[in-house]
Image (cartoon, rainbow, N blue to C red):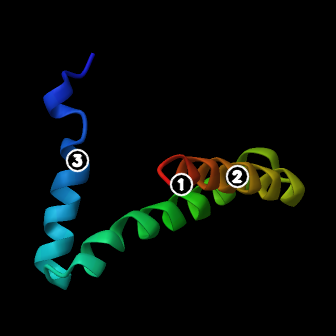
Amino acid sequence: MISPNQSGFLYYVIAWLWSQFFGNLVTVIRSLSPVISLLSLVSIYYLYQDLFRLPLTSSMAVSLMLFRINAYAQVGN
């Protein structure tokens, strides 16, 4: 089990590299999460496409992920 102080270590390393490469502006730092989300959606689509060979299954998986991301984003408001 991961201890609480190490749970987001990889994200913080990626965020630090992102800020070193693109700058320290707030918009630059906040743009990392949508980029990671888009990359995960694309990777889920191609993973399901490779596993099941059905475009409908891949589209359904991505739409379910979008619904989950949208529901997660609305919890914070």
Label 2 Cα neighbours within 10 Å, binned few <14 / some 14-19 / many ≥20: few
The reply to whether residue 47 is in sight is no
The kind of secondary structure element at disc 3 is helix
Q: Residue at x 25, y 72 (%)?
A: 29
Q: Disc 2 versus disc 3: distance between alpha carbons?
A: 25 Å
Q: Nearer the viewer, mark 1 or mark 3?
A: 1
At label 2, the amino acid type is Phe
Residue 29 against residue 77 in the figure, above or below: below
Q: Quadrant of the image for the N terminus?
A: top left
Of the residues under marks 1 and 2, which one precedes in the sequence?
A: 2
* In the foreground, 25 or 36: 25
**Label at residue 73:** 1
**Label at residue 10:** 3
Residue 56 is situated, as x and y percent measured from the top left of the image, at 89, 56
Residue 35 is situated, as x and y percent measured from the top left of the image, at 43, 70
Label 3 Cα neighbours within 10 Å, binned few <14 / some 14-19 / many ≥20: few
At label 3, the amino acid type is Leu
Residue 39 is situated, as x and y percent measured from the top left of the image, at 50, 65
- Locate residue 38 relative to residue 67 in the image: left or right: left
At label 1, the amino acid type is Ala
The kind of secondary structure element at disc 1 is helix
Of the residues under marks 1 and 3, which one precedes in the sequence?
A: 3
* In the foreground, 25 or 50: 25
Q: Residue furthest top?
A: 1
